[in-house]
Amino acid sequence: MTKKGLLIVLSGPSGVGKGTIRKKLFKDKSLNLAFSISMTTRNPRKKEQNGIDYFFVTEEEFKSRLEKDDFLEHVYFVGNYYGTSKEYVEKLRNEGKNVFLEIEVEGAKQIMDKCQNENLVSIFLMPPSLTELERRIRGRKSESEEIIQERLQKARREINLKSNYQYVVYNKDLYKATEEIKEIIKNRMNS
Ligand code: 5GP
């Protein structure tokens, strides 16, 4: 019988580098990862593709799925809905894949409460400093000042919740942070 895959949750304030680290992790095939593509009502950013980065849907569609209880977790974050498909995650885990969720803290908390007996690996990625985080968020040049301020405020609140996670990794150096996360996953795969 195939061993059910891990449920890996990576959180951290927006701009901390979760996406970059995720892409590096996925290059290591020995980790046997599958990305949980979230559904969101947010508009795509430049270079983002539907069905790869997110499933971009209307608010109507999102709410209809919410009513059908399709989400393992969901959240309203800075003006938009985001959610993880229950069915998609279960299917991949049953195929033996280690499913990787890149989600914010409220959704992660819902999963920690619901999946206590599951093989859950929760990791919080910390920025080197808030100044550096602000520089990265501004560097995207895709959002208004108001949204940037909201994201920064949310970042401060998120950082306060890092102790809910099993592991806290500092992203001072991209290579080191990626290697640290690889080690965590490999250890948990073998335990
Ligand atoms: P962004 O708009 O920058 O892509 O995402 C905003 C935040 O929402 C990020 O912290 C991202 O990790 C998180 N996020 C993305 N998808 C989901 C999801 O399905 N559920 C939850 N709870 N958060 C998500």
Image: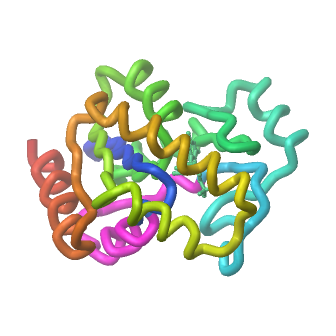
Confirm whether residue 98 shows in the render.
Answer: yes
Q: Quadrant of residue 80?
A: top right
Of residues 80 and 72, the one nearer the viewer is 80
Question: As displayed, is residue 77 above or below residue 23?
Answer: above
Q: Quadrant of the C terminus?
A: top left
Give left or right: position of 152 versus 94. Answer: right
Can residue 1 be seen? no
Chain part drawn in magenta: 19-37
Question: In terms of depth relative to the viewer, which is nearer, 177 or 120?
Answer: 177
Q: Position of residue 187 (x, y in %)?
A: 10, 50
The x and y percentages for residue 91 are 50, 45
In the rendered structure, does residue 14 fall within the stretch colored magenta?
no
Q: Examine the rendered structure and indicate whether residue 22 appears above or below residue 175.
A: above
Q: Residue at x 69, y 25 (%)?
A: 69
Left or right: 26 as drawn, with respect to 179 = right
Residue 155: x, y in percent? 48, 45
Q: Is residue 36 magenta?
A: yes
